[in-house]
Amino acid sequence: MSTKTTHIFSLILSLILLYGCTSPRAHPPTQLLTLEPASLPSPFANNDVLISFIRDASDGMDEISSCLNAFDTYRFVLDQDGHLIRFDETHYVETRISQTEIDKLLSEIDATGFSSLTGDGDQYIPNAPPPSFKNTWGGSITVNKKTITITPGQSDYLVEAVIKTLAIIENYKPKNLQLYAPEGITLWVFLEENLILGPANPTPEPPVLKWSIDEIDLANLAMGPFTNQPQMIKGETLAFLLRQVKTVPAFRRVEQNGQSYYVLVCPNFPQ
């Protein structure tokens, strides 16, 4: 066999092998969910937060109770451009305030003496008892990048500057507040038979939601009795969920394809 013939034969063989290893491109399956394995983008970058209040969950509190009561996440957060989100007893609301309102709010907090605190123990009155986990709460307050931590068991012994600052934050309810529409949520899906309800119960109105599998396939998201893997959701599926539950957080009972589920919808904030 000549050298030229050998080269041609090798070329033909390579093409055959290449074609045999390459299958026609299949159309990707329709994706009903937009899922994110890590934290979603948030309206609040860490360096944009101007004022915030976070209250910690107590020891032993389950994820459902923690979510529904806004523990271990923002109860109040205001960013540099005036976007405000606050927890209003059972759900989150939001608005945008002017720079004049921001300056007024900061001035009221500054008048309490909060800015003079170091957070190294001077947030408590002198001779405060050591930390305890009985009947008190913990958390943190941030104002202008200064964060004062409140240790569980010592929240009954806060100095006036912290007490007054906390009161200003909790009582600040500007006009034009509307239901908060998050950019992303954390979704927990439980099979009814796998969940033993504690003090938290689903919202009763309506008592049961009926969702089409074409909108969201709960069977693919349901956690087992010993697994703990919520999904983070945005996009069209998020819009569907918000239309259904109306407010966040939310805990609802849902029926789909003859199966009953409990669905927990929690806003996804950065920490």
Image (spheres, rainbow, N blue to C red):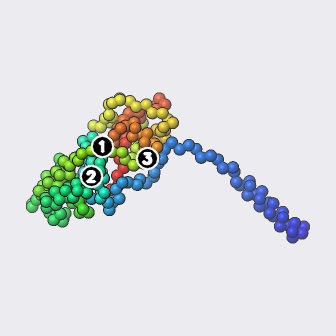
Amino acid carrying label 2: it is: Ile
**Given this view, does label 2 or label 3 mark the residue nearer the observer?**
2
- According to the picture, the residue beneath numbered tag 3 turns out to be 233
Image coords of residue 43 (percent x, y): 36, 54
Residue at the spot x=85%, y=66% of the render?
Answer: 6
- How many discs mark residues in the rendered view? 3
Q: Is residue 175 above or below residue 196?
A: below
Among numbered discs 1 and 3, the one appearing first in the sequence? 1
Q: Quadrant of residue 244?
A: top left
Q: Secondary structure at mark 1?
A: strand
Element type at marker 2? loop
Which element carries disc 3, helix, strand or loop?
strand
Kind of residue indicated by mark 3: Ile
Quadrant containing the C terminus is bottom left
Q: Which mark is residue 97?
A: 2
The answer to whether residue 123 is above or below residue 233 is: below
> In the displayed structure, does residue 55 sit left or right of residue 167?
right
Q: Earlier in the sequence, mark 2 or mark 3?
A: 2
Q: CA distance from mark 1 to mark 2?
A: 13 Å
Q: Tell me whether the residue at label 2 lies in contact with that at label 3, contact meaning CB atoms closer than 8 angstroms.
A: no
- Quarter that holds the N terminus: bottom right
Residues under labels 2 and 3: Cα distance?
28 Å
Pointer 1 residue: 178
Lateral position of residue 252 relative to residue 132, left or right = right
Residue 260 against residue 230 in the figure, above or below: above
**Which residue, as the protein is rendered here, is positioned at the far bottom?**
3
Residue 67's spot in the image, x, y percent?
A: 31, 45
